[in-house]
Amino acid sequence: MRKFLLSALALALVVTAWAGPDNNSLIVGTTQEPSDLGQWNGSADTKENALGLFFLGLTYFDSNGALQPGLASEVPTGANGRVRISGSGDSSRQEVDWTLRADANWSDGTPITSDDVLFTFEVQTNPLIPVSSTANSSKIEEIVKVDDKNFTIVYNTPNLFAVNPGGDIGLARFYDVAPKHVWEPIFDAAVAAAEATPASAGDIITQQFIGAAPATAAQGPKVTSGAFVMDEWQPTQFLRATRNNGFVLGSAKLDFVQVQFIVDQNTLLANIINGTIDASDDIGLAGFDPDELAAQGTGVFTVQVSASGFIEHLNLNLHPECQDAVDLQLGDKRTRQALIQAINRAALGPAVFPGSIVSTSFVVAGDSGFLPETQEAWPFNPAAAQALLAQLGWADSNGNGVLDRTTADGRFVEFDLDHVTTTAQFRLDTQAILERDLNAVGIKVIAKPGPGSVVFSDAFIQHASQCSWSHVFEFAEAAGIGQSPFDPLSKQLDARLIANAASAFGGNNVGGVNIPALQTLIVQAENAFDTAARAALVEQMQQIFLDELPIIPLYERTEVITSKIGLKNYGKVTPLTKTIFWNPWQWEWE
Amino acid sequence: MIKFIARRLLQLVPTVFVISIILYALLALKPGDPIDDMRRGNPNFTQADYERLRALYGLDDPWYIRYWKWLARAVQGDFGPSRQYGMSATLYVFQYRLPNTVLLSGLSLLIAFVIAVPLGIYSAIRQHSIADYAITVLNFMGVSVPIFWLGILLIYVFSVQIRNFLPAGGLLTPGVSWPDWNTIAANSGGGLLEAFSLYWSKALAVISDRIKHLVLPVAALSSLQLAGWTRFMRSAMLEVVNMDYIRTARAKGLRERVIVYRHALRNAILPIITLVALSIPLLFSGAVLTETVFNWPGMGTAILGSLLNNDFNVSMVSLMFIALLVLIFNLIADIVYALVDPRIRYE
């Protein structure tokens, strides 16, 4: 009996000390769990991170932000003749030749071939599959198989990849290839079942394909191209991956990696401080003060902070159809210039989102480097704001502290500014600061927070032209990803994408931004393949944006990650992408 | 009585039907659907994508058409998939969530009851003593302290300050899973006794790990119920001990222990039992704050998550299940009333 109890005690101690450098493993903590690990739908950060354990793209970014060949033997460029652009304007066409590494195999030993690439494309373009966007795949005209290891992707638009390999990271890093021999039978069966029962097609595809065992906790990715293979996935708790010894870039340094899901940020932090969690991802500690974290982590973990490319901004209702917005003259740039100068943005960002950076950009990410001097644009200047508002005919005629005016049709209007946003604490804090700052110049802010699922519902956010939200909607968007002039431009500035009755309320330009000079440049930039020419266009766009201010940028969020002392190569932030990519085969303990 | 039960059971059918309509309508009329979530998460999302996916999921139908389609499948036991997790919504709720909630809430309820009753009695029979005042103060603290704050405090003390004395949330330690007898038997290489010993030593380690993970959330959750029930027990007991029949019992010279436990407690505990019985449906609906702070995947966070993420099928399964439980426990309560109280008769 004594022996029995001792062995039980020993085991209990062993399981408590399961992770860490002692057994060459790593536990990463995050607050979100991916719903599935299929390579077809969705691109939440958590999922992309976890997918990085199991799948390698055709290319990947190294710690210096340089694009490196992953499954491909070489990064296609214009110089090596693998990227060819022909035609111009709408008739332009682009071809990219890829060669898969000869020794690239799935973890079960099956070679990775062009057939896997073609199959992945077939799935992504099948109308029955709920791929969250066909935008990338729809730009692909066709994929031509040359042989088992060579294929050519033909695009119907040149604004992808271009001659700059960093031109579209969506194509490079995230173009995952799925194992055809695993998925094809599942796909065929699910599609056949859905076609046989069209009324339940969505549910059938969700359950039989999206929710199929190789993508979910029932099994997870057991056949992978990445550094690890799924070992166990306990829903809501953790997923554990073991090393794939046949990984094409060389075996990972760690034996195991475990991703621990802890929904509450404070609980996650407690686990980091007490040493249970070795590292945190870029989502888990968002909004925490990096300095405080560093103080708490002394001797235990280090803190890395980076700009995220996500710009918190005030989206203004510029739709001429919305009378409430017209009454406040939001369509006049002087009103917008008055608003930005009335807000003490230098104080706001750090107060609500510690570590954030004041941003005055939106065309591409905040510190893109195109207009470094514009970081100082529109400093806090309430007097200038008041002067502009006075120019527009606003005055406090009844002495109640709120500006008012009489419209051309004789109506009395007060400057009551609706501020819609989600109920996240940092946004509620922002509302309080905006109330204080704007009240000081005679603008009364009416806070209208709501749950994200409500305010971001199609019926709400897309219908600003019908005054579903009348004045200001605060949210965040990754306007661009980084410093490359080939970054995608903000779709919120593109007049072709205005969400109104004419577009059936579709389109990403929810505020109704329509600035002809900006629009001309956007169209020109789509067909500019020369890096310098495109950079010049982006710079001009930025200048116009800063003058017109169709959107008021507040601050760029920062990402905070922690890693236990002794952990190497974890959580790199590339200068090119600013996004933290998981290259887990490089993680190791000192 | 049998007629009454049969009638009430029959009444359940239209009641459940009406509840399902109301729930479905509320969920369907709430702004937002899964396709909105996709649009929000992807700036490349096109209007064509939006319309294609709405048609694929049948979301372009009016809500009452969607309800009939849902009902036609639900009566056959098919509540559809969880759009968030890809698996059957029923499986997700009953396999991955409900057992955790029953374990956490059940233990909390049990511990609170076992402690609250004697504490309430003690407090009542020692009314105005220092112990009574101390218990009262602690009870008020228990009722007043927000559970999320208490949870964080417990984690801070027992997991951060006393480093890793108890785990800071979660169901189990990574790497710990129930042993597989066949593997152990095959690898033991020795006799059955050795395999059996190894199996149970591993099983004991799992049980011990599970208990370690339960301590803090159970302590936090039971503290609230404990405080409330102790107050109830004290009040009920005080009311009874001042009644004439207790005075009579004392006058007869009965021992205090007999008076308290045989005469007073039997009457005083009736309202507590009612209170506990009414808490049983709560046992299945989860405790959102406790589950969130302690990373305990239960029904509370499942329902909240499904509502926030527009996972309609999971919301419907969870809410319908709870509604059904409430109806059933109401019926059971009515039956029990009739059994214990001779004044109540059902025709």
Image (cartoon, coloured by chain):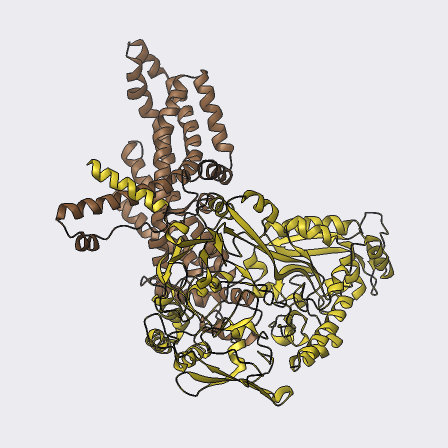
Residue under the image location 31 percent in, 31 percent down: B343
Give x and y (percent) for residue B272. 37, 31
Classify residue B89 by image quadrant. Answer: bottom left
Q: Nearer the viewer, residue B271 or A337?
A: A337
Give x and y (percent) for residue A236. 41, 54
Chain A painted colour: yellow
Q: Residue A456 vs residue A342: left or right?
A: left
Q: Nearer the viewer, residue A435 or A143?
A: A143
Q: Quadrant of the C terminus of chain B?
A: top left
Q: Residue A398 vs residue A170: left or right?
A: right
Q: Nearer the viewer, residue B279 or A579?
A: A579
In the picture as drawn, the residue positioned furthest to the front comes out as A590
Give x and y (percent) for residue A115. 39, 82
Q: Quadrant of the N terminus of chain B?
A: top left
Chain B painted colour: brown
Q: Residue A358 vs residue A95: left or right?
A: right
In the picture as drawn, the residue positioned furthest to the left comes out as B191
Question: Would you say residue A485 is visible in this rendering?
Answer: yes
Against A431, is B240 above or below?
Answer: above
Give x and y (percent) for residue A129. 43, 74
Classify residue B207 by image quadrant. Answer: top left
The tally of labels here is 0
Against A296, is A588 above or below?
Answer: below
Classify residue A12 by image quadrant. Answer: top left
Question: Would you say residue B280 is visible in this rendering?
Answer: no
